[in-house]
């Protein structure tokens, strides 16, 4: 099942399928390690939902909700 990273709940994990969108935001997400097949664990969201914190490649990363919405993920059981 695929869904965007902003729809994940704490503890959910998955693999990056693709980054939607274009331009500087897409390049920035790639530079931060969000590349296809990278394993991501959703850790938590701020009280108002923005930003979200994920773990990828052994480090923690905070993303804006809008950025997370452009990351298409394959949910892992």
Image: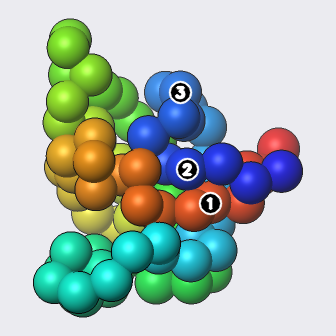
Cα distance in 3D space between marks 2 and 3: 11 Å
Extreme front residue here? Answer: 22
Q: Which mark is residue 57?
A: none
| Quadrant in the rendering for residue 50 | top left
Q: Residues at badges 1 and 2 in contact (C-beta under 8 Å)?
A: yes
> Can you see residue 25?
yes
Residue 32 showing in the rendered view: no
Q: Earlier in the sequence, mark 1 or mark 2?
A: 2
Pick the residue in front: 21 or 34.
Answer: 21
Which circle's residue, 2 or 3, is located before the other in the chain? Answer: 2
What residue sits 22% from the left and 51% below the top?
Answer: 63
The residue located at (64%, 74%) in the rendering is: 17
Q: Residues within 10 Å of mark 3 (few under 14, many from 20)?
A: few
User: Residue 4: which numbered mark, if any?
Assistant: 2
| Quadrant that contains the C terminus | top right
Query: What whole-number distance in Å separates the C-alpha atoms at marks 1 and 2?
Result: 6 Å
Give how far across and how far down residue 60 sits, in percent.
25, 55
Is 12 rendered above or below residue 36? above
Q: Secondary structure at mark 2?
A: strand
- Vertical comparison of 71 with 26: above or below: above
Q: Is residue 3 left or right of residue 68?
A: right
Q: Which mark is residue 9?
A: 3
């Amino acid at each position: 099942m695929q869904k965007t990273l902003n729809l994940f709940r704490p503890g959910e994990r998955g693999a990056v399928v693709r980054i939607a969108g274009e331009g500087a935001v897409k390049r920035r997400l790639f530079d931060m390690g969000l590349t296809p097949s990278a394993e991501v664990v959703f850790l938590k969201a701020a009280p108002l939902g923005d930003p979200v914190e994920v773990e990828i490649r052994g480090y923690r990363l905070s993303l804006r909700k809008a950025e997370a919405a452009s990351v298409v993920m394959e949910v892992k059981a």
